[in-house]
Amino acid sequence: MSQEIAVVGSPEFTTGFRLAGVRKFENVPDDEKDERLDDAVERTLDDDRTGIIVMYDADLDHLSRGTRERVEGSIEPVLVTLGAGGAGSGGLRDQIKRAIGIDLMEEDD
């Protein structure tokens, strides 16, 4: 079974991905993130057709502790955050390492 990319965030954030062909998305307006973002992320995590979840890194601050731990620890689907490099982003290198279990960029001494 092939898996899809899902995008979760504000309509402004998801629009570019939708124009690029991403069909799975959860729009959560900025002024409703504290109330609705957890549910949107949980629905996306529970969807077996989702392989990658894309979020804006600053949106992780709006998640409850339980949902944030679940999404950050998820192997499948894997979380990829984009943005200014907030505290939860961990960097692309760490995200790849978490997703596949090894550090592909590790240098030999």
Image (cartoon, rainbow, N blue to C red):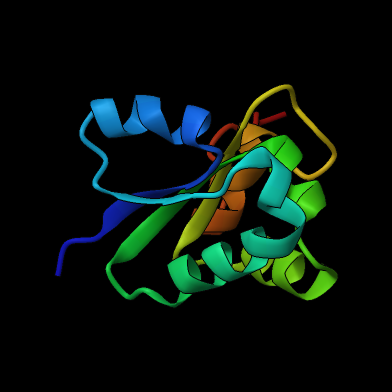
Please say whether residue 71 is visible from this viewpoint.
yes
Relative image position of residue 32 (x, y in whole percent): 68, 51
- Residue 43 is left or right of residue 65, and the answer is left
**Residue for point 69% across, 38% down:** 57
Q: Nearer the viewer, residue 3 or 23?
A: 23
Image: 75 above or below 32: below
Please say whether residue 89 is visible from this viewpoint.
no
Residue at the far left: name it: 1
**Residue for point 64% across, 62% down:** 36
- Residue 105 is left or right of residue 76, and the answer is right
Relative image position of residue 80 (x, y in whole percent): 54, 44
**Residue for point 78% across, 75% down:** 66
Q: Nearer the viewer, residue 66 or 2?
A: 66
Relative image position of residue 42 (x, y in whole percent): 55, 72
Q: Which image quarter: residue 82?
A: top right
- Residue 13 is left or right of residue 36, and the answer is left
**Residue for point 24% across, 60% down:** 3
Q: Which image quarter: residue 51?
A: bottom left
Relative image position of residue 23 (x, y in whole percent): 24, 47
Picture quarter with the N terminus: bottom left
- Residue 62 is left or right of residue 6, and the answer is right
Residue at the far front: name it: 31
Picture quarter with the C terminus: top right
Q: Nearer the viewer, residue 29 or 17?
A: 29
